[in-house]
Image (cartoon, rainbow, N blue to C red):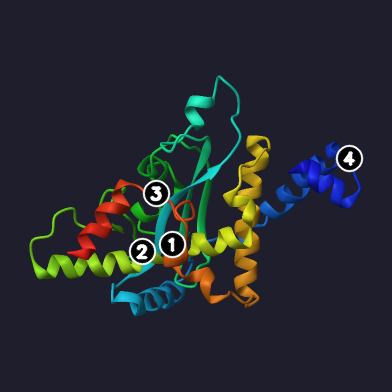
Amino acid sequence: MLLSVADFIGVSKASACRIVKKVTSAIASLSPRYVKMYSTNAEMNRAAEEFYRFARFPRVIGAIDCTLIKIQSPGREDDGIYRSRKGFCALNVQRVSDARLKIRNIVARWPGSCHDQTIFNNSSLKEAFQNGMYGRYMLVGDSGYKIKPYLMTPLQQVQTPAENLYNESSIRTRNVVERQYGVWKRRFPILSLCMRLQIETTMNVIVATAVLHNMAIDMNDSIPGEWTNPFNADEDEIEQDDDHYVESSTLSR
């Protein structure tokens, strides 16, 4: 990848490597400005209203999920830590998406073998919700997370029409984070390729693309319709695991 970039712009591979490292680090440093959760009740109320339009699920201000970003093996010593359940080395990246597909929170430092719940448990986001920073508002996630007063997930067993309606509304509301990943990945194809960079640089690349993704949305960058259609995705585009399968099975009933 770096060799191709170097050849294209007429510099050495070493120069291309240094440029990529410096530029992505500079863009990633803007994340506190462009990738941030809500700070006022008015912002949270507006976000909840936007989510409510999807499936009438109240008080939701974000959909949370993790996705695997492929990386080259960091070496024999750390290979097992970064090797994901799908057999390739990766970073497991946590994202919170709003109804407009903006990334409101991102954590891009955990190896691919880590579970989604572990990443959330050790995040400042969970601490903020536990401390009441977001009041009565909450997140919606898949069955890989434990249900909490501030994090709603689908029920594993549905017995009543009301429970089935809850599951359907929850899944349809959470689907926004899957669509967000599809758009994000199409804007920046490097996210679907195997990054052959140092781990620290790879983390900066991921955060930098999140910053640029949000900037594009703020600037009303046009998004072709097929970018946001989750049913046009190939098997590798949207990360599927057993929890997602349980949700789909529940919804079909």
Residue 37 appears in the rendering = no
Q: Earlier in the sequence, mark 1 or mark 4?
A: 4
Point 18% across, 53% down: residue:
156
- CB of mark 2 within 8 Å of CB of mark 1? yes
Q: Earlier in the sequence, mark 2 or mark 4?
A: 4
Q: Is 167 above or below relative to 28?
A: below
Q: Is 73 above or below relative to 218?
A: above
Point 12% across, 70% down: residue:
162
Point 90% across, 44% down: residue:
11
Closer to the camera: disc 3 or disc 1?
1
Q: Residue 174 shows which numbered tag?
A: 2
Q: Is 61 above or below relative to 12?
A: below
- CB of mark 3 within 8 Å of CB of mark 1? no
* Residue to which mark 1 is pinned: 177
Q: Residue 228 shows which numbered tag?
A: none
Q: Residues within 10 Å of mark 1 (few under 14, many from 20)?
A: many
- CB of mark 3 within 8 Å of CB of mark 4? no
- CB of mark 2 within 8 Å of CB of mark 3? no
* Residue to which mark 4 is pinned: 12
Label 1 secondary element: helix
Point 44% across, 53% down: residue:
235
Q: Earlier in the sequence, mark 2 or mark 3?
A: 3
* Residue to which mark 3 is pinned: 127
- The percent position of residue 132, horizontal first and vertical second, equals 35, 58
- CB of mark 1 within 8 Å of CB of mark 4? no
Instruction: Work out whether residue 209 or residue 230 is closer to the camera in this orientation and state it.
Output: 230
